Amino acid sequence: MKKLAIIATKGTLDWAYPPFILASTASALMYDVEIFFTFYGLKLVEKKLDLQISSLGNPGMPMPMPVPVLMQALPGMQAMMTTMMKKKMASKGVAPLEELRDLCVEADVKMIACQMTVELFEFDHSDFIDGLEFAGAARFFEFAGEADISMYI
């Protein structure tokens, strides 16, 4: 069986989709899949998903009209951009993030939270979804070292 190892480090709405889309697709193609969530990527496995979009530092983000970077930093812009992105995704039939994450759980994608990061940010294990494994990077490397494909997202 082929193996896919993914390291998820980002905690914004736009960066949440790639690990779950790739993991669920690989699982459907009969890959053994593990995702290691570390640093801000831990936001993706919290029970309550409340992720935002930030165009700051992401000049490639397509906008319906050009918005100067200075204006993107104004209060309320992040919420507005998040709402716009969610509407765009829904209009194009993109599954909601919760649905993609649930699909990964149902497909037996192994999800691992970085224990060191959990301790660093003083999270409680109860903040996270059920079935999540808590382990260090060495545990993930046992799998990633034998993976056919490894991705850093």
Image: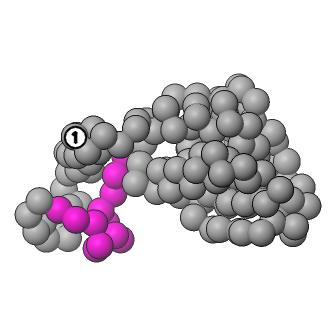
**Magenta residues: mostly which secondary structure?**
loop
> Where does residue 35 sit, x and y in percent of width and height?
70, 52
* Image quadrant assignment for residue 111: top right
**Res. 119 visible in picture:** no
Quarter holding the C terminus is bottom right
Q: How is the image coloured?
A: one colour
User: Residue 6: horizontal and vertical position, in percent?
Assistant: 68, 60
Range drawn in magenta: 52-63
Decide: few, some or many residues near mark 1? Use Cα within 10 Å; few <14, some 14-19, many ≥20: few
Q: Quadrant of the N terminus?
A: bottom right
Whether residue 15 sits left or right of residue 118 in the image: it is: left
How many marks the image carries: the answer is 1
Q: Residue at x 40, y 54 (%)?
A: 14
Q: Which residue is at 20% across, 70% downward?
A: 69
Q: Which residue in the structure is indicated by mark 1?
A: 91
User: Is 54 displayed left or right of 31 in the figure?
Assistant: left
At 8% from the left and 63% from the top, the residue drawn is 65
Along the line of sight, the residue nearer the viewer: 111 or 45 = 111
Asked if the magenta segment contains residue 144, the reply would be no
Up-down relation of residue 149 to residue 47 (above or below) = below
